[in-house]
Image (cartoon, coloured by chain):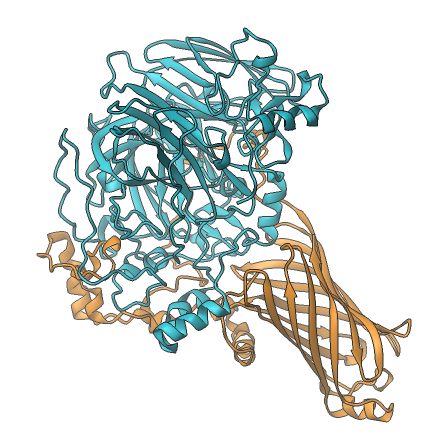
Chain colours: A cyan, B orange
Amino acid sequence: MKPLSLVSPVDATRVDLPRRRFVQGLAVGGAVAGFGLLRPGQAHAQARAGHPAVLSGTDFQLDIGRTLVDCTGRVRPATTVNGSLPGPLLRWKEGTTVTLRVTNHLREATSIHWHGIVLPFDMDGVPGLSFDGIAPGETFTYRFDVRQAGTYWYHAHSHFQEQTGLFGALVIDPTGHERHPADRDYVVMLNDWTDEDPAHIYALLKKQSDYYNYHQPTVPGFLRDVRERGLGDALAMRRKWNQMRMNPTDLADVGGAAYTYLMNGTAPAGNWTGLFGPGEKVRLRFINGSASTIFDVRIPGLEMIVVAADGQDVVPVAVDEFRISAAETYDVIVQPRDTRAYTVFAQSIDRSGYARGTLAPREGMQAPVPAMDERVWLGMQDMMGAMGAMGSHSPLSPRERVSEGRERVRPEHAAHGSPEPSPPAPLPTGEGSQAVHHARTEYGPSVDMRVDMPRTNLDDPGIGLRDNGRRVLTYADLRSIDGPLDPREPEREIELHLTGNMERFVWSFDGLPFSEAKPIHFRYGERLRIVLVNDTMMNHPIHLHGMFSELEDAEGNFLVRKHTINVQPAQRISYRVTADNPGRWAYHCHLLYHMEAGMFREVVVS
Amino acid sequence: MRRPALASLALAAVLFAGVVGAQDHGHAHAEAPDMGDMPGMEHAGMDHAGMAMPAASGSIPAPALPHAPHHHAASHHSSAQPHDMSAMPPMQGGSPPPDARDPDYSDGIRSSPMHGMDMGMEDRPRLATLRLDQLEFFDDRAGRGLQWDIQGGYGGDIDKLWLRTEGERRGGRLVHGDAEVLWSHAVAAFWNTELGVREDLGEGPNRHWAAFGIQGLAPYWFELQLTGYMGPHGRTAARLRAEYELLFTQRLVLQPELEVNAYGKADPARGLGSGVSDATLGLRLRYEIGRQFAPFLGVEWTRRFAGTAESARSRGESPSERRWVAGVRLWL
C-alpha cells in the first residue's frame, strides 16, 4: 500500500492560508476541514473525520465545487458537494416533497442523479435525457415526492465527475416505523479514489486495456504449475484462454495501481471508526459509490444479517460476507457483544487493495486487518457459462478446483424465516423461452466473444468467493419482503446482450455502443421481462433509471427488487419491469469506464 | 497488449499460414477457435442432468433429475443426434446467422435530440498515439549505429490514420529505412485491415509502394502484421512481422520478434535479390518502470538470402550478422 493519510477536503476558493501548507498541516494533524470549520454555523459543517455532515429535512442547498483533497499524500482537486468527500449525507422522509437547489461553482456543466429514486424523469439528473445539465454558475432546482424508504445514494452523471468525488449517501426514513430498529445507524460508503485524471485513465485503457493489471499470468507461474500438476494440466488450463485471447486475470479495469479505496472518505490508514456499545444492534448501510470497483465485504468475528438490498427490505439472511457491485447498496445489522474492535474489511474483486474501517466501543481502537484473499483466475463457467460449469472434465483454473463432494455452505436464514430455497431447477438446454439469441450486431469488431449457453443459476457468489469456507450472500438468497410491485406476468420480453471487446476497450449492448444505438422503447403501462446475457468475462452492474428491476430466478419466480443488477460473466439473468414512469431514461453499466465506452442505452417509456 | 501465454515462435509461422490461407473466405473465420476439441463436450456432458449443475458447485456431480416436460424436446434431440460440438457456433468471430436477433427495440422512436452529448459521453473517442517500440543503439561487427521502430496515429476504435517507420543510421547517414502511412480499419474483433503507401529511403534510389495488409492479434497472443506492396514497373514486396511477449514478472518482459521481407523481383540498385531477402529475429528483455516506459537490452540476428546475400557479399558485407541492442520503449 501507498502511504496514506486522512482525507482532508479543503475548499480551495475559500482558504486564505497558503494552500499546501494548510492541507498538509491538517493531514498531519489528522483533522478534517470542510469549509464549515472555517465558517462555523454553516449547515455544511462536518462533525469529524469520516462522518460527513448530515443534512435532513425537505429543503436543501447543495454547492458543487472544486476542492483540494489529500487521500494519498498528494493534494489533488476533487469535485465535491458542499466541499466534502463524500458529499453530505442527505436524510429524507418518505411521504414528503423534497426541494434541492444545486448550484454549480465549476467551470464545466454538472448534474446530480438520485440513484434508485423513482421520480419524474425531468428530475432524474441525466444531462441530455432528463435535462440540459447545470451550466457553470447556474442553480437547478430539483423538486419531487419521496415515495420510498431505504438506503440510496446520489452522484454526478456528467463525464467523469463521479470518479473525482461527486457522490454522497441518501437515507430515507420510512413513514411508519423502521422494520429493523437498531441502536446505531451508520452509512458505510465505499469509493475508489485516484490521483490520476479519469479522462487520462480512459485514454490509457483504450490504448492498452490491461494497463492497470499487474496480476497477469507469467512464465514462472507456468513453470510452477508444470511442477505441481504436470505439463499437460498446466497447458490445458491456459489453452482456452490463450486460444481466445482472453485474460483469466481480467477482473477489474483499474485496480490498486491507480486506486486508493476509501471507506466514508477515509483511506485505510485513516481507519474510519463507527462506535457501538456491546450488545447494541448496529445498522450498517453499505453503499458502493465506486466508479469502477466491486468490493467483497466482511467483518471478521461478526455475523451480518442482510435486511435490505438496494434500499428495499428483504427477508433477513445471515452471512459472513457479501459482494457489492458498483452502485448497489446493502443494509446489514450486526450485534457485537464483546468490548473489542472489529475490522470492516472491503477488498476489491481483483485483490489489488481494500477499504477498511473499524467498529469499536471507543475511538482509537483497532482489530487485526485480514490479509487479502488469494487471487484466483476466472473459471471456465465465467468464460463459457453452463458449458463451462459442466466441466468436471474441463480444465479449471488454478485454485478454482472444488474439493470433491464438498457442498457449498448455504447461508442460514435468520429468525424471521424465509421461503425454503427452491430445488435446483432443470437448466434450459438452449430451447424454449430461455434460448440465447445473439443480435446480428454482435458479429463485428466491437465484440470479442459470445456465450451460447450462459449459466442461469443465481447461487454462485462469483469469482474469488466460491468455496471460500464463508457464508457468502448470493442473489439466490435475496427475497423482497413484500413481493413484486406488479403481480402481472410479463407480456413482452426484451433480450439484450452485454458485449465488449477487451483488447479495444469497447463496451456495448448487443455490440452497439450508445452513439450507434437506437433507444429501447417500453410501451407505457406494460409489464416487461428484460433478459440480459453477459457475453463478456467481466461483471456488469446494470442500472435502469426510473423504474425498479424485479429480479427473477431461472424459472421466472420473483426474487428481489433492485435498482442495479450485477450480471456475472457468461450469465443470463432476467427481471421484470413495469413501464409506469413515462420519459427518457438512462440504462447502463455502472462501471464508469464501461458506460463511457458505450455500454449505455436510452430507454423511452411512452 | 501483452501475452500471458507461453508458446513457441514457430507457431507464428503456422498461424501466419492459416491467416493467409483464410483470406479468401474472410479472415474472420480464421480466428474462430475450433470448438470441436472443447473438453467435456461429449454426448454425456450434454444431457440435462449435467447441465443443471449450478456453476458454484463446480465438480460436484449433480443428481439426475426427472424429465421436466419442457425439457423433453431438447434431450430427445440430443439423444437422436449425438452432439458434435463443432456444430456449435463459435464463441468468436463468424458472421450472423440468417435468424440473428434484431437489436432494434425502438418501435421507430428517435433518440433524445441531445443523445447524451451533455453527459460528456464519448464512446468512440479519437485518440492520438505515439509508440516508440524500439529506439535503440546497436553494435555489430561493422560498428555502431542507431535504429528505430516507431508507430503512431490518430483515430477511433474502428478507423485510424496510422504511421509506421523503421530504419537504421550508421556513421551519420541513413543506411536504410522506410515509412508507411496507412488507413487502419477494424474488420473483426482482433483484426484490422491496412491500406496506404510506403516509401523506402536510404542507400540506393527511393522506392514508392502502395501498401495493403492485415494487422492484429492471432490466437495464442501472437501480434501479427502482414503487408503486401506494389510499386511501379511491376515491383512487388511483402513483409511479415510477428511479436510475442513472455512475462517473467509483471514488469520484466522478454519480447521475441520476427521480421521477414520478400521481393517479387530483384532491385540491384538497392542490393535486393528476388524472393525472400532477409529475416531478422530479435530478443529484447525490457523492464517496465512504468507501463509506458521501459529500457531494454537485446540481441538481433539478421540473415540475408539468395540474391540479397550475394549483393551483400559483393559489398564485402556478411550475409549474416548479430547485433547487440540497447534502447528504450515508450509510448504516449
Task: Name the residue at 37% across, 22% down.
Answer: A118
Above/below status of B253 relative to B140: above
Front residue of this view, candidates B177 and A59 = A59
Is residue A408 shown left or right of residue A382? Answer: left
Task: Name the residue at 24% across, 12% down.
Answer: A176
The tally of labels here is 0
Front residue of this view, candidates B93 and B142 = B142
Above/below status of B98 relative to B239: above
Is residue B232 shown left or right of residue A266? Answer: right
Q: Quadrant where the C terminus of chain A lies?
A: top left
Can residue A555 be seen in this snapshot?
yes
Front residue of this view, candidates A275 and B321 = A275
Is residue A379 shown left or right of residue A218? Answer: left
Q: Quadrant of residue A604?
A: top left
Residue A132 screen position, x and y as percent: 57, 22
Residue A98 screen position, x and y as percent: 42, 11
Can residue A605 be seen in this snapshot?
no
Residue B118 screen position, x and y as percent: 58, 29
Above/below status of A312 relative to A506: above
Residue B309 screen position, x and y as percent: 77, 90
Task: Name the residue at 24% across, 70% down.
Answer: B83
